[in-house]
Amino acid sequence: MSKKDLKYLINRKDNQYEVVIGLEVHAQVLSESKLFSTSATKFGAEPNTQVSLVDAAFPGMLPVINEFCVKQAIKTGIGLNAKINKRSVFDRKNYFYADLPQGYQISQFKDPIVGEGKVILDMPNGQKEVGIERLHLEQDAGKSIHDLDPQNTFVDLNRSGVALMEIVSKPDLRSPDEVNAYIKKLRSIMRYLGTCDGNMQEGSLRADVNVSVRPKGSKEFGTRCEIKNVNSIKFMQMAIEYEANRQVDLIEEGKTIDQETRLFDTKKNETRSMRSKEDAHDYRYFPDPDLLPLEVSEKFIEELKNDIPELPDDKKKRFIEEFKLSSYEANILVSDIDTAKYFEEVVAKMGKNKDIKLAVNWITGELFAVLNSKGLEISQSPVSAKNFAILINLIKNGTISGKIAKTVFELMIDGDKDPQKIVEEKGLKQQSDPKALEALIDKIINDNREKAIEYKQGKEKLFGFFVGQAMKVSGGKANPQLINEILKKKL
Amino acid sequence: MSDITKRSLTELVESIKNKKLSSSEVTKAFIERSEKSRVLNAFITEDFTSALDKAKKFDQKPNLNLKLPGIPMAVKDLFCTKNVKTTAGSKILNNFVPTYESTVTENIWSEGAILLGKLNCDEFAMGSSNETSFFGNVQNPIDKNLVPGGSSGGSASAVAAQLTPITIGTDTGGSIRQPASFTGTVGLKPTYGSCSRYGIVAFASSLDQAGPMAQNVKDCALLQEVISSFDTKDSTSIDFKRSHYSKDLTNNIKGKKIGIPKEYRVDGMPKEIEDLWQKGIEYVRDCGAEIINISLPHTSYALPTYYIVAPAEASSNLARYDGVKYGYRANGENLIDMYEKTRSEGFGAEVQRRIMIGTYVLSSGYYDAYYLKAQKVRRLIKNDFDEAYKKVDAILTPSTPSAAFKIGEKTNDPVSMYLNDIFTVPVNLAGLPGISIPAGHDTKGYPLGLQIIGKAFDEQNILNIAYAMEEKINFKNKITDWWIK
């Protein structure tokens, strides 16, 4: 397929439209305590048990910046190949809401901590660069719970003051698939860095999606709509698809698109207007006088740079060069840090005479299948990397066949058993003694003379029959490669 | 016992240290006088029973090494005090009892002082006459129906009337110095960053600063020594080497260069203020200091700048009083209705006016013309002082353009009320320390103050100048106890 064919376009009778998407991703900073207070940030705690006087905005309470969160933001900036701003400013974004105790959110408006950067996406038709506009630090709000009581709204302030990184992309994305790849890439980078756990179910990663459409080939942007607070990749894709089509329909009908904020209704699979541009809040941003401008030194940034682990792009490159993996295989292994870790541990444990291809096949094949069926993450794998490496080595050195290995693997799952022991206890060791195998095959040929003759007369299909017999007689333990060789010789 | 309350802090500390007086005796004396002085309306909350208990406890095991051993004192009701109601002079906090203590008051209690109660002030410290308090006017002990100034009006009145030996106020645009001037007392606004703002109900965060108020300079220095500390809980707190303000206090100011800014000779300034200033200049000269004429060219922009910056910050700082978490809540049909009712019933007129001004100047389309420009002018005002301090060590000005006025005289004219702070506001905008000392009387016999403005962190120097001048001026407050029947 050529690149052109892969382009995501919305088709109408006479026209084709391109979709332009920009994302504002809100990523919760992985940190023990909040951005400006010492309260805990643990997910799922009892309501209002992780709230300090600062978080609840009591009179006279003052914010004090959490240095760890600053480091996390800078590390993320480095991971996004972005410019780190040595001076940034915290501003107040003023609005009233029941779950916003201060009556303002402390955010960064004019001077964010991280400036322009980029991420590379691996798309089926090649690599795609997506620009990062900025990354800034801000406080999360609390949570309003409307469905506990018909009359009252309940407020949980556990989340109030938790540090978020808002990562704003340039309007460089062109399809739901690219959005999928972009979110996964961001998530992957942040998980490598340990700056965000990327857990979308728990709300650690969510996004506002800006969508506009324009006739194919046009250089100008259309009027955009912002879809607020979408919390899964699937919903983002659905929302974009719906919204882009809605906008195209409006244009086709000769109508104009209003710049507005919309909400995605996951049940009805549609977006609907939340507020128009005219109703947009005037947030009255101004520098927070309780906080001094945040200044970081070159040395501070350099030290963090030294702390940055090998990131997915570099790891992929290395896997391809060092282990001769295909780009596809490398992608699968590096996209999730825990998979990469597992793979690298397996490689290390396999020792000198290792078969990396075989290990990759087994990880992406058997291991992934087991994890999938059990609903486990690779970090929870029932088979440790160490035992997994032993298993691969047993196959590689001919102790067991691939087929037997599958049986062994199934036995390993229960309690992470040592495959070596399973092979010994169950007597599953492959028969690779040529003399014994020759005797076994002699006997089979003897017992099936007629078939042997038919084979010799040209019925080649029967070769499989003899292999099968050999495996059956040996209880599956015969070395299939040797069986093949001997049979060819004898028949 | 009645003379106990007439004594200065320094004398009281000495008496307690010499065991001539017990904390209980001192505490009882101030309580008795306060009880006889309720007409002044200086207290919002009296904490007398608890104060006596604490005094008794102190006497049982007195720690005489402390700086304020068993000294009772009342504080402005803007400081959060653990388990004691803290209102900021507002209906919206009328039921608010903090579970925490401000750093400044914590510093005071840990030096042995005992809380007598919480003193009246303008609502959220917004006012220059203590008339915006939800808890009513405060009487100036100088004369009947005279305002004590504001916003620390209750504090000034209580010190002048000897209901507390010393007190603390807060100063955002003159709220310590102006009431000190109106009541014949001494008030210091320290350098921004000297005293922690933690636990002080915020008015305008970039200007607010706590400071001591006392009957004389030495007491003021001692209290400043206690309350000033570096505090990691306040990001704007500054870690500088603080002097032992009372121990290092000296009246030797020979050779000090004192600047006289020509721009403070404002149009329509009463002659008695001009005369007072001239007298002040002579006093400093008598002390061996050198007088140098200086210019602070952007002075006239200070007041408008202040009335943009302070309301802007206030409009945001006061957003937290929304009826959701604590304080006053009105019933509403829905969330917005509840907000509107709570805030229109809970805040007084002046606070609402400033929230509206602040909201306006921060609005999109107006931000650049007002808030941003004000920030630039603020920088120019600070530069003026920086320039001046290349030539002089301190600056001498009047504290206020007039003496105390009658209650109700200016309530319908906010601009005339705001003009009270014309000499004090530039100091806050520049973050500098300033002290007001009583220096004379007007024709009616009301006290008038002079202000000494210092370099940043140079409190010791202005305290020394004030100390030397105090000796020369030999001011006597004319208080007749008119309110005690």
Image (spheres, rainbow, N blue to C red):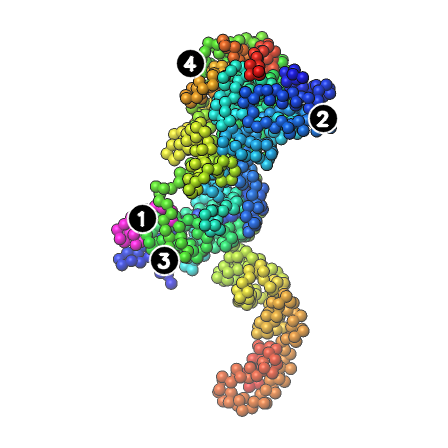
Question: Mark 3 or 2, which is nearer the eye?
Answer: 2
Same-chain status of marks 3 and 4: no
Which amino acid type is shown beneath numbered disc 2? Asp
Residue B76 in which image quadrant: top right
Q: Secondary structure at mark 1?
A: loop
Residue B405 position in % (x across, y down): 47, 16
Q: Which mark is residue A257?
A: 1
Q: Residue at x 50, y 10 (%)?
A: B444
- SS class, disc 4: loop
The answer to whether residue A134 is above or below residue A268 is above
Residue, disc 4: B267
Which callout, 4 or 2, points at the residue further toward the start of the chain?
Answer: 2
Query: Which residue is the site of mark 2?
Result: B59
Q: How many marks?
A: 4
Disc 1 vs disc 3: Cβ atoms closer than 8 Å? no
| Residue designated by label 3 | A7
Q: Are marks 2 and 1 in contact (CB under 8 Å)?
A: no
**Cβ atoms under marks 4 and 2 closer than 8 Å:** no
Magenta region: which residues? Answer: A248-262
Which chain does the numbered disc 3 sit on?
A
Q: Residue at x 44, y 42 (%)?
A: B335
Q: Are marks 1 and 3 on the same chain?
A: yes
SS state under label 2: helix
Of labels 3 and 4, the one closer to you: 4
